[in-house]
Amino acid sequence: DAVELGQYRHYMQKEIFEQPEALANTLELIGNGGRLQPGIFGAEAASLLDGVRSVLILACGTSYHSGVTARYWLESLAGIPCTVEIASEYRYRSSAADPDQLVVAISQSGETADTLAALRHAKDLGHTRTLAICNVPESAIVRECALRFITRAGPEIGVASTKAFTTQLAALFLLTLVVGKLRGRIDEQAEHDHLACLRHLPVAVARVLELEPSIQTWAQNIAHRHHALFLGRGRHWPIALEGALKLKEISSIHAEAYAAGELKHGPLALVDRDMPVIAVAPNDSLLDKLKSNLKEVQARGGELNVFADADSHFPETEQIHVLRLPEHYGDLSPILHVVPLQLLAYHTALAKGTDVDKPRNLAKSVTVE
Ligand code: G6P
C-alpha cells in the first residue's frame, strides 16, 4: 500500500490517531485571526448562500451521521431549518423542491452511487444551490456541485470512516457559522469565540486520544458480547448512532443506538445483564434527563459504560463504569465524544480478532447501487 502504517497495526487505528492533524489541516484556512468569509465554500458562495431559507443534507453511512449532527448546529446556531435524508431514500421519493433551499451532499469519497444519484435528482427537481463536502477534490460529487468544501483528512483507507467524519463535522460547523452570519444570527463576538474553540480542537482531540488504555480494558468486556446498546441525547444522539455503526461494522457485534428518551418506548425490553449499554454523557443541558434515563437501565440490571465529561458527576459502581473526557467542549462536543467510540469499536474488533480494515461484506466506497 502507498500509505505506510508506521507504528500502527491497522489503518483504522492510524486514522483515528491522525485526527488532530486532519482537523488542523482542514481548519488551516481559518488562520489565527480575522473573520470567516463565505468564499471558503467556493467563488460563488456569497451569492448562492445569500437568501437560503433552509438546508437539505443528503448522505449515506457515516457521512449521514455527520449530517444529522450538523442539523443541531444549523438550527440552533444559524436558526435555519434543516432536514437530513438518507440519499438512497431521497432519490426515489417524490419531494417538494424549494429553489431557496441549499442542498448539501456529504461524502468522504465523493463517489457513493446513492449520494451522487440523490444530488442529480435534487438538480432535476430544480435545485441550483448545491454544496459538496468531500474528502476527494476531483470526485464526481464535487464536480457536480456549484459549491464545495474539501476536507483535508488525507487518504482514508480503513473501511470504517473515522477522520473523514470528524473533518466533515468541522466543515459543517464552518458552514453553520457562515450561514449564521449571513442571517444575522452570529455576531462578531460569537464568531470570534466559535473560531477560538475550533482552533483549539486538534489539541482537545489529542487529549481524548490519551484515554486509549482505559478504552482497551472496556473493549475486553464488550468483545465477548452479542449485542450492545448505545444511548445519547440531542446533538450527541447522532454520535451514539455513529458509535453503534462503528462497532457493528468492524466487530460484527449487533449494536443499536437510541435517543435515550426513547428507551421506554421499546429498547428497555432488551436490557438485562448481558446487554452492555454505552452512554454518551457530556455535561450539557440534557445531562440530568440522560441520568434519569440511565437509572431505568440500572433498575433492569443493565451494565452501564458511560463516556462522561470531567465534571459530569457520575458515581462509579460495579454496574456503572465511567470514563471522563478531559473537558466539556460546548457546541463542538460531538467531535470529541465520537473519538472514544471509534477507539472502543477498534479495540473490541481487535480483541475479537475480526478484520478491522476490511470488515466482511463491506466496501470502502459503494459506487454501484
Ligand atoms: C460505505 C463505507 C462507509 C461510508 C459510506 C458512505 O458504506 O463503508 O464508511 O460512511 O460508504 O461513503 P462516502 O464516501 O459517501 O462518505
Image: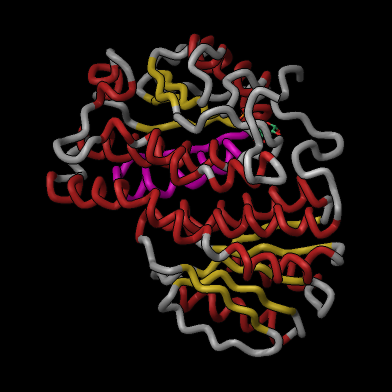
Q: Is residue 20 left or right of residue 280?
A: left
The reply, left or right, for residue 293 in relation to residue 188 is right
**Residue 74 included in the magenta stretch of the image:** yes
Residue at the spot 72% in from the left edge and 64% down from the top edge: 229
Please say whether residue 353 is one of the residues in the magenta stretch: no
Q: Regarding ligand 1, which quadrant of the image does it lie in?
A: top right
Q: Position of residue 92 (x, y in %)?
A: 68, 22
Q: Nearer the viewer, residue 155 or 179?
A: 155
The secondary structure that dominates the magenta segment is: helix
Question: Where 210 sits versus 162, above or below?
Answer: below
Tell me residue 241's x, y (percent).
Answer: 63, 52
Residue at x 57%, y 27% (from the top left corner): 155
Q: Position of residue 167 (x, y in %)?
A: 46, 38
Q: Nearer the viewer, residue 51 or 138?
A: 138
In magenta, the rendered stretch is: 61-86
Single out the residue that lies furthest toward the front. 7
Give x and y (percent) for residue 190: 19, 50
Q: Could you tell me which quadrant the C terminus lies in?
A: top right
Residue 323 falls in image quadrant: bottom right
Q: Which of the 4 image quarters holds residue 243? A: bottom right
